[in-house]
Image (cartoon, rainbow, N blue to C red):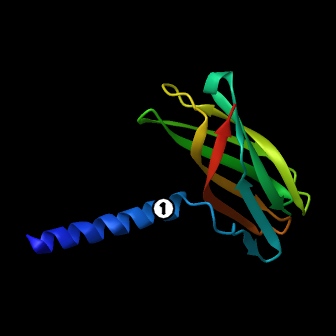
Amino acid sequence: MKRKIKVAAVGTAISGAAVGGMLGGAGPALAYDSAGLHLSAVAQSPGRLVGGGAALWVPVDVSCNATEYPYVSVGITEAVGGRIASGTGNANVTCVGAHQVISIPVVASPGRAFAPGKAVATTQIGGCLADQTCGSDSNMRTITLRR
């Protein structure tokens, strides 16, 4: 009996650490840098709810130098009343070689609206240079949603 309790406690501690690590947004954002190509996109707070939570605008800090096919996508997942609200949005971006903030619309999937609170934002950026050096980068962090 003692052995089972220890195993359960260790499993619970490890699970809690894994979830905490996934949801925490305290670390620095990493970016894709290779062969002259630089790609970075990080969702920012607050995401602004519109249409009673049917959608939201998510500010994304973008830094890139891709000249061909640059895009940014963002997915939002939020626990609302014991259920999950989620949605995705994307945008083509003009890379300027420096930081810029763009707003990406995210529409909630049918069945559950977003609400004020905390949500997990997963961003992805991709693109290529003229010499066909291509890459992508993604990250996940917690952001705040507000009206």
Left or right position of 136 against 8: right
Disc 1: CA contacts within 10 A as few (<14), some (14-19) or many (>=20): few
Image location of residue 85, percent across then percent down? 51, 35
Choose top left, top right, bottom left or bottom right for residue 4.
bottom left
User: As drawn, which residue projects farthest toward the left?
Assistant: 1
- Residue for point 59% across, 40% down: 117
Image location of residue 96, percent across then percent down? 91, 58
Image height check: is 60 above or below 38? above
Quadrant into which the C terminus falls: top right
Image location of residue 83, percent across then percent down? 42, 35
Res. 126 visible in picture = no
Left or right position of 113 against 48: left
Q: Which amino acid does label 1 sit on?
A: Gly
Q: Nearer the viewer, residue 132 or 113?
A: 113
The residue indicated by pointer 1 is 20
Q: Which of 86 and 26 is in front in this view?
A: 26
Left or right position of 106 against 66: left
Image height check: is 112 above or below 145? above
Choose top left, top right, bottom left or bottom right for residue 15.
bottom left
- Residue for point 87% across, 54% down: 100
Number of marks drawn? 1
Res. 136 visible in picture = yes
Image location of residue 81, percent across then percent down? 44, 32
- Residue for point 48% across, 61% down: 20
Q: What element carries label 1?
A: helix
